[in-house]
């Protein structure tokens, strides 16, 4: 299913397509004056076409909930990309005092992952053309997934300060109650810096296929 979008004549990025969601759950594309499906919106995302979804009655922006619904639909079809442990970790972070840091962290991680994937696709196109080296592609995919899962496993707000991940130094004993908040913030900052360094190393390792 191909989805077309209007391109700006000036070369500027076109405004997001407005999608209205009605009480009967039907989705209406205001640009094409037609009803669409979640599959249609998923294809728009794949093609890089931006859109927003609003409640037809209240005008509330419900883009986030609709995108989440698309993910649920894809997962229900057997397109399983979200590991069980990842889902458990994500759920455990709701309501945690570090919850505010998670969106930015996940966004940066996925941007790094997407950049790596683009470079792999370009490498394959330049070196193999239409011939798809399945064994190499599978190995690269495994490396990318290992990179993302390892990055997520390192993000644990309940981890004792001083631990830098599964391959890092052994955890130290927890600080006694009443320790200065400045020390805890310093430990957290060190953890984040170590995490960033490891993410960069893992990303660079995946960007240079043999």
Image (spheres, grey):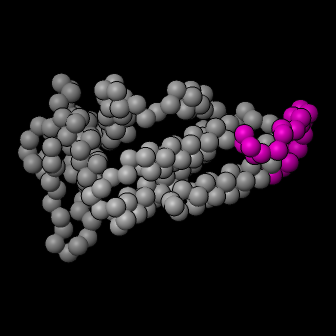
For the image, the number of numbered tags is 0
* Residue 125 on the magenta span: no
Q: Nearer the viewer, residue 74 or 208?
A: 208
**What's the magenta bit mostly, secondary-structure-wise?**
loop
Q: Nearer the viewer, residue 100 or 104?
A: 104
Location of residue 42 (image quadrant): top left
Query: In the image, what residue occupies the spot 77% across and 53% down?
Result: 190
Query: In the image, what residue occupies the spot 30% across and 56% down?
Result: 131
Query: In the image, what residue occupies the spot 64% across and 38% down?
Result: 153
Query: In the image, what residue occupies the spot 82% across and 44% down?
Result: 169
State whether residue 186 is above or below residue 174: below
**In-image side of 184 versus 87 (left or right):** right
Residue 88 appears in the picture as rendered: yes
**In-image side of 23 versus 76 (left or right):** left
List x then y, in percent, for residue 132.
Answer: 33, 52
**In-image side of 57 versus 107 (left or right):** left
**In-image side of 200 versus 63 (left or right):** right
Location of residue 70 (image quadrant): top left
List x then y, in percent, for residue 72.
Answer: 36, 29
List x then y, in percent, for residue 34.
Answer: 8, 41
Location of residue 37 (image quadrant): top left
Q: Residue furthest left?
A: 33
* Residue 169 on the magenta span: yes
Residue 20 appears in the picture as rendered: no
List x then y, in percent, for residue 134.
Answer: 38, 47
What stretch of residues is rendered in magenta? Answer: 164-186
Q: Nearer the viewer, residue 206 or 65?
A: 206
State whether residue 206 is above or below residue 142: below
């Amino acid at each position: 299913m191909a989805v077309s979008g209007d391109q700006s004549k000036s070369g500027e990025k076109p405004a997001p397509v407005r999608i209205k969601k009605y009480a009967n759950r039907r989705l209406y594309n205001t640009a094409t004056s037609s009803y669409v499906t979640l599959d249609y919106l998923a294809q728009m995302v794949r093609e890089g076409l931006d859109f927003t979804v609003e409640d037809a009655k209240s005008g509330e922006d419900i883009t986030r909930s609709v995108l989440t619904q698309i993910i649920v639909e894809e997962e229900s079809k057997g397109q399983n990309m979200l590991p069980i442990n990842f889902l458990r970790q994500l759920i455990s972070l709701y309501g945690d005092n570090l919850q505010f840091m998670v969106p930015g962290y996940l966004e940066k991680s996925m941007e790094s992952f997407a950049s790596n994937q683009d470079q792999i696709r370009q490498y394959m196109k330049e070196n193999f053309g239409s011939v798809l080296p399945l064994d190499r592609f599978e190995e690269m995919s495994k490396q990318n997934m290992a990179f993302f899962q390892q990055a997520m496993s390192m993000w644990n707000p309940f981890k004792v300060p001083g631990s830098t991940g599964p391959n890092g130094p052994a955890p130290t004993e927890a600080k006694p109650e009443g320790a200065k908040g400045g020390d805890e913030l310093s430990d957290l900052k060190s953890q984040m810096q170590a995490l960033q360094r490891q993410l960069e190393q893992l990303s660079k390792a995946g960007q240079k296929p043999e």
